[in-house]
Image (cartoon, rainbow, N blue to C red):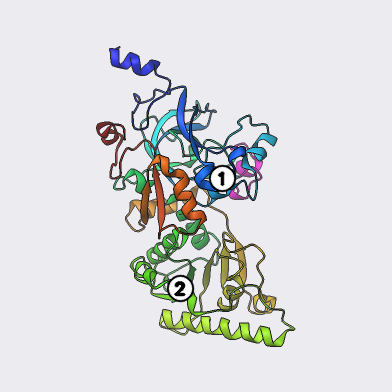
Amino acid sequence: MSAAAMTNAKQDLFDLGDVPDLGHVPARMHAQVIRQDRFGEPIDAFQQEPVPVPELGPRDVLVYVMAAGVNYNNVWAAMGIPIDVIKTRQKKGEREDFHIGGSDASGVVWATGKDVTNVKVGDEVVVHCGMWDPDDPHVVAGKDPMFAPSQIIWGYESNWGSFAQFTKVQDHACLPKPPHLTWEEAAAYMLVGATAYRMLHGWAPNVIAEGDPVLVWGGAGGLGSMALQICRAAGARPVAVVSGDSKIDYCKQLGAVGVIDRRKFDHWGKLPRWSDELAYGEWLVGARAFGKAFWEALGERKSPSLVFEHPGETTLPTSVFVCETGGMVVICAGTTGYNATCDLRYLWMRQKRLQGSHFANDDQAKGINDLVIAGKVDPCLSRVFPFAGTGECHQLMRDNKHPFGNMAILVNSPKPGLRTVDEVRAAGTP
């Protein structure tokens, strides 16, 4: 063994970008850590600390993280609301008094548990955030694991997420990194992309098909940018809803056949009580005007067969109203609030479907990854942050000041534009 290799083998903590020998696992790693006494604004909650490298179980994979994606779930983790993720895990018997978040990653397989067969050390991968007990009877029976009692989200409900030099993931969550993408591009799309893919393709018979009109809320955001491209790949006709003129061209480039500016309407919020004829009548005027705006944006007097929802409280009454007879409103979040209302008369008389949706299973994660590999879906990466900027980018998201599309954080990759581990080694430490 050379002197350099002997030094490498003894070293227990490496600088960011100082790549260990392939397969050498140090004792400690740098991580962006949240602790309970720092719960609050993300800019202060995230702090860089050295922590132990996690131990692997039989079906676990240790990934050397090149870049990590940014999602709203770790704004919640930083603030300690709606749940204290640390306390919740400790109640289940986990020992760690800290949280390492991050539910999107690109990187290199660095070590594997003894029962892992689908990946090997050295593979370049992206990671999806669906996590469940492989011995869960629901999973063993071949049912959708996203309905399993053991299902959680890696990097939010679990510890050891991607905001660290190494992350521990389940073997089934590893997918091939699209070779044409940089590390930061590859880290940016999986959570929102797979979520959107399940919403649009996962709820038969209400799935998108050639020519279908689709209403996509937040078309310029992380979820919306994925939804527009997935619709385009399926031949559907999405109409995007945005809140600014600057987002119109962006959405059209992603596949929107038309765009609606929500600022032109003022009927948002809780649905008035049906017995209040004046207030309900005013709301109905606004909802019908929005439906007409959809027809105009589509270029045809047809209502959306599928409504892609996530704002929730302020928009759901309108979504249910404008959805086509026999169509579906599918919702994965409530970014404007959770106490949503709708007029049930339209739901039952016109036999519409209101469907909740949460992340994706392995097949659906593979579905979006295949579209990315084929060049049919772009990650829509808008901004890249250094590792030290983890708190900053989450604060931007918390303050609703983040850019269009998706953001990423460089972890071990020292600069944007790199695509392989050899390029990272050649670039050296940041």
Who is closer to the viewer here, 292 or 48?
A: 48
Q: Main secondary structure of the magenta part?
A: loop
In magenta segment, residue 139: yes
Apparent side of residue 286 relative to residue 238 in the rendered image (left or right): right
Q: Residue at x 57, y 54 (%)?
A: 358
Q: Residue beneath label 2, please?
A: 212
Name the quarter where the N terminus is drawn.
Answer: top left
Work out whether residue 148 or residue 84 is closer to the camera in this orientation and state it: 84
Q: Which mark is residue 78?
A: 1
3D distance between C-alphas at marks 2 and 1: 40 Å
> Which class describes the residues within 10 Å of circle 1: few (<14), some (14-19), or many (20+)?
many
Q: Position of residue 371 (x, y in %)?
A: 38, 55
Horizontal side, residue 28 vs residue 136: left or right: left
Q: Is residue 319 magenta?
A: no
Please provide the residue range marked out in magenta: 134-151
Q: Are marks 2 and 1 in contact (CB under 8 Å)?
A: no
- Compared across the picture, whether 372 is left or right of 151 comes to left
- Residue 222 position by quadrant: bottom left
